Image (cartoon, rainbow, N blue to C red):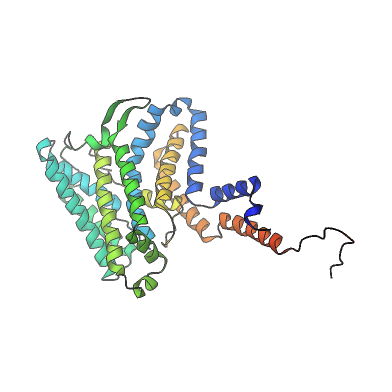
Amino acid sequence: MTRSSTTGPSGRATEVLARLLGGGSGTVFALIVVIFAFVFVMNPSFAQPRTMVAFFLLPAAGVVVLAIGQYFVIVSGELDLSVGSLVGAQVVIAARLLEGDDSRTFGVLALMVGFGALVGLVNGLVVTLLRVPSIITTLGMMLILFGAIRLWTGGAPTGELSTRFRILGRDGISDVPVIGQLPWAVLVLVVVGALAVWVMRTPYGRTLMAVGDNDVTVRFSGARVWQIRTAAFVACSLLTTLAAILIGGRSGLTAQVGQGLEFTAITAVVLGGIVLGGGRGTVVGAIGGALALQALFVLFNQFGMPSTLNPAVQGLIIIAAVAYAARPRTGSSFRLLRRGRDDQRDTQPAPPTGGAPTRRD
């Protein structure tokens, strides 16, 4: 009897259950379904497509882009704590330079891209060439950006984002059937997600994953690990800049912009099943983690819980996810259990077709 012949409805059900409980992208999307089941029971009007787009997907777009950037760094075995301060710095700088003038928008956007790339390059080179741990490097960058912006603005950000700058964050395609308006931010989310999936399927993406798993082996194979990791930091900072444009465009200039977003991005990534040590996890999982985190905040809002509780929840999720990842995976246990049963059936001698049963010693 072959193994394939043992797969039937019960086998497929076991496989589906293993995927849902295995801690990967299947688990996090199942979590989203469960969360929204509670949300829809508490507030049936939230199930309307217009409401879902306006109050779930639109606020989630910036967080998803931020999580994708953090994914590139984490899967390479590093960490970037400077993304929250970079979002705040980018929005404050843009508002100060724009002063509400639309004619300056493209120049300021180009400056933001250059500044984001520079921050990522510095982070990457300090980590890879000077061999400073990424948690120390990016913590230092976080404090540098935070302190520099406070020194520049005196602790009270001034200026105004232009109307053209805020198009991506709050406008969209009007008169779309069913949903009314399709926000540009949601389209950006879809495009960035698709590009990230494509990148991870290229030779660079596969090497990036291998670097997070075992950088020594990758180095012996001839690849330049420092270039691969530095590119991941630059990609993270560029996507953080894009997230700043979306978040600033939607919320405008506030003194708290970007505050705590580094932990939000890390929480989203680990919630999506990506291991903090690198080398394991998918972009789809990171996207699912960001959506699940946003769905959780929607649920808290329906319960009337204060948003000040969010950091505590994120901390609990990070600890629980890391502890869960350190244990043998449920999905693996299911597969091993099922495979063991199949192997036992394969090696078990076929019962005699006739005569008296043989005696077993």
Residue 262 seen in the figure: no
Residue 202 seen in the figure: yes
Query: Is residue 223 shown left or right of residue 338?
Result: left
Find residue 49 and report its image quarter: top left
Q: Nearer the viewer, residue 2 or 144?
A: 2
Q: What residue occupies the far left of the structure in this picture?
A: 103
Residue 161 percent across, percent down from the top left: 18, 37
Which corner quadrant holds the N terminus?
Answer: bottom right
Q: Nearer the viewer, residue 38 or 18?
A: 18
Compared with 329, 38 (above or below) is above
Query: Is residue 16 shown left or right of residue 116?
Result: right
Q: Nearer the viewer, residue 154 or 50?
A: 50
Instruction: Identify which residue is drawn at 57% across, 51% down.
Output: 18
Q: What residue occupies the far right of the structure in this picture?
A: 356
Find residue 334 and report its image quarter: bottom right
Which corner quadrant holds the C terminus?
Answer: bottom right
Residue 188 percent across, percent down from the top left: 29, 41
Q: Nearer the viewer, residue 150 or 354?
A: 354
Q: How many marks?
A: 0
Instruction: Identify which residue is drawn at 19% across, 50% down.
Output: 113
Q: What residue occupies the far bottom of the structure in this picture?
A: 220
Query: Is residue 276 shown left or right of residue 184?
Result: right
Instruction: Identify which residue is drawn at 32% across, 73% down.
Output: 222
Compared with 318, 248 (above or below) is above
Residue 117 percent across, percent down from the top left: 21, 55
Find residue 123 and report its image quarter: bottom left
Residue 73 percent across, percent down from the top left: 34, 58
Instruction: Identify which residue is drawn at 52% across, 29% down.
Output: 41
